[in-house]
Image (spheres, helix red, strand yellow):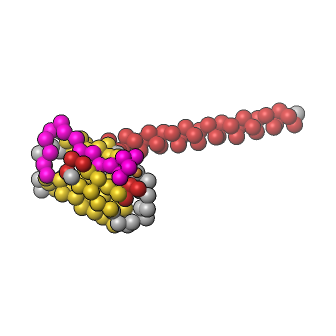
């Protein structure tokens, strides 16, 4: 009898763990779907601002933005001491060392539809890409 009770208990614990994992995966899926709504791109008065955070890489890594629009890139750092603080945007001939914490503004001239702009850490290990449509 005792062993049956133990088996039931183990089954209940296993079921609980499985549902926790399922909920966690589902929540992650939701967060990914949220990324595509692009909360980091805002368009105000004919120009757009794109926010990207740099710490252990860049986030978000894939951004879709409006073509033919003056663009302000805001790179946010917060306790960033890894190499993602060394940012280059080859297409713009831009290179800077981001402060450990703060906001760095990069003015990006209007880009053609279908073009992309890629930012890299100094070693090319981390990157982000903005697609203009
Ligand atoms: Cu790097």
> Between residues 118 and 5, which one lies in front from this camera angle?
118
- The residue stretch that appears in magenta: 109-125
Tell me where residue 77 sits by quadrant.
bottom left
- Depth check, front residue: 34 or 95: 95
Residue 126 at what x, y percent from top left? Answer: 38, 47
- The structure residue drawn at horizontal position 23% and vertical position 55%, both measured from the top left corner, is 94
Residue at 35% in and 57% down: 86
The residue at the point 38 percent across, 55 percent down is: 84
Instruction: Answer with left or right where residue 26 lies relative to residue 9.
Output: left
Residue 3 x %, y %: 85, 34
Toward which corner of the image does residue 18 lie, by quadrant? Answer: top right
Q: Is residue 9 above or below residue 51?
A: above
Say left or right for 20 vs 41.
right
Answer above or below: position of 8 versus 60.
Answer: above
Q: Is residue 23 left or right of residue 66?
A: right
Q: Measuring 26% from the left and 51% from the top, which residue is drawn there?
A: 89
**How would you classify the magenta stretch by its main secondary structure?**
loop
Residue 77 appears in view = yes
Which quarter of the figure is the C terminus placed in?
top left
Does the magenta portion include 110? yes
The front one of 130 and 93 is 93
**Quarter in which the N terminus is drawn:** top right
**Image position of 76 with respect to 89: above or below:** below
Residue farthest along the right direction in this orientation = 1
- Quadrant hosting residue 75: bottom left
> From this viewpoint, is residue 38 visible?
no
Q: Position of residue 13 (x, y in %)?
A: 70, 40
Location of residue 71 in the rendering, given as x and y in whole percent from the top left corner = 17, 53
* Residue 64, magenta (yes or no): no
Q: How many marks?
A: 0
């Amino acid at each position: 009898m005792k062993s049956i009770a133990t088996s039931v208990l183990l089954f209940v614990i296993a079921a609980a763990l499985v549902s926790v994992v399922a909920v966690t995966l589902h929540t992650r899926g939701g967060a990914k779907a949220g990324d595509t709504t692009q909360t980091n791109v805002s368009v105000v008065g004919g120009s757009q601002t794109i926010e990207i955070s740099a710490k252990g890489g860049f986030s978000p890594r894939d951004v879709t933005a409006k073509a033919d629009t003056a663009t302000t890139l805001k790179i946010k750092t917060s306790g960033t001491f890894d190499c993602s603080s060394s940012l280059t945007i080859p297409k713009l001939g831009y290179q800077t060392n981001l402060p450990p914490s703060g906001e760095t503004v990069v003015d990006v001239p209007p880009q053609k539809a279908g073009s992309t702009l890629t930012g890299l850490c100094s070693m090319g290990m981390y990157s982000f890409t903005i697609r203009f449509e």
